[in-house]
Amino acid sequence: MSWQLALLNRHLRWFEKPALARHGIARLRKSFAFKARLYFHAPRGTRRRRATLGGVPVQWVCSRRARKSPVILYLHGGAFVFGSSDTHSAMLGKLSDLTGLPACLPDYRLAPENPFPAQIDDTLACYRALRADNEVIIGGDSAGGGLALALLHQIINLDLPQPKGVFAFSPLTDVTYSGKSVVENAQSDSVLTATRIGEMVQAFIGSHDPRDPLASPLFGQFKGAPPVWLTVGDTEILRDDSLRMQAALRTEGVECALTVVHDHPHVWPMFHNVLPEARATLRDLAAWIAARLA
């Protein structure tokens, strides 16, 4: 563990985790947007462009060396209630620089103003529009990682042309929160708090069945799916979401690579400006993407 990671874990545990536990949705949105501008920075020369894709507002993020295709379709995290293409554009700028691929980040509709299934509808519309002219790699983190896997289930269910692969950082794959790590890691997780699970689920899904695969891809069907790449920290409350997702995918014959790292915070690649571990993870992912496109 680097000294940067040890210091970051302390900061997150002392300041960010308590804030997530007590602040309302409106304040979380403003706070995350402000801190993302302050702390996360894309490589020099990264280009950003806003557009509309499939009727959904998106932000294109491209490094100086990015070609036009294939495309990374990236779904941001934020418990389905906060986060945006802006909060995650710096990390995708770094990934674009490593892969040479452009990234498209949808600003899908957020709950509770737009409850389930508005999010999957928006991401599916973007995928259809992108896949008409491009090969696509789908990615996401946290709730967006779960959304990426739910989108994969939907693509298979609708018999649409498939992506080249799907990746996710610390994905939320089960909104029933039945994984043992939700309880076992409640104290050790340096970012997420288990105390607001019920509130966030209610905001996102309301009275809808939480076992719907479009909300909880852990219960989806993935036979014939392309390879999947996952990573998660062993002290996260969402650790078992990745462990069980890998097991479910492998049961259906899907190739799934999972890396579990020790004492890394939730979605640590976002801290690529300061964490050597974050840069290492992004390099590993870039190598996997390159292999998928070879």
Image (cartoon, rainbow, N blue to C red):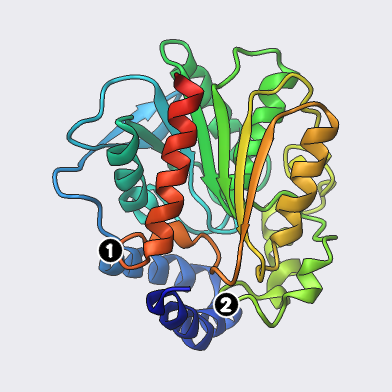
Residue 154 position within the rendered picture, expressed as x and y whole percent measured from the top left: 70, 26
- Mark 2 lies on a secondary structure that is loop
Mark 1 falls on what kind of element?
helix
Please give left or right for residue 176 compared with residue 76 in the image: right
Q: Residue at x 50, y 59 (%)?
A: 82
Residue 290 sits above or below residue 109 on the image = above
The relative height of residue 79 versus residue 66 in the rendered view (above or below) is below
Name the amino acid, label 1.
Arg
Q: Can you give x and y, in whole percent of width and height, for residue 221 in the image?
A: 81, 29
Residue drawn at the location 79% of the way across and 22% of the way down:
223
Is 70 placed left or right of 17 in the picture? left
Q: How many numbered marks are there?
A: 2
Asked if the residue at tag 2 contacts the one at tag 1, i.e. Cβ–Cβ closer than 8 Å, the answer is no
Residue most extreme to the bottom: 14
Q: Residues within 10 Å of mark 2 (few under 14, many from 20)?
A: many
Quadrant (top left/top right/bottom left/bottom right) for the C terminus? top left
Q: Which residue is mark 2?
A: 190
Residue at horizontal 73 percent and vertical 44 percent from the top: 215
In terms of image quadrants, where is residue 177? bottom right
Picture coordinates of residue 99 (x, y %)?
34, 34
**Measured Cα–Cα span from mark 1 to mark 2:** 21 Å
Q: Residue 264's image quarter?
A: bottom right
**Residue 106, horizontal then vertical, whole percent:** 44, 38
Label disc, if present, on residue 37 of the rendered structure: 1
Q: Amino acid at mark 2?
A: Ser
Is residue 216 visible in the rendered image? The answer is: no
Q: Residue at (27%, 40%) from the top-left corner? A: 97
- In which quadrant of the rendered view does residue 79 lie? bottom right
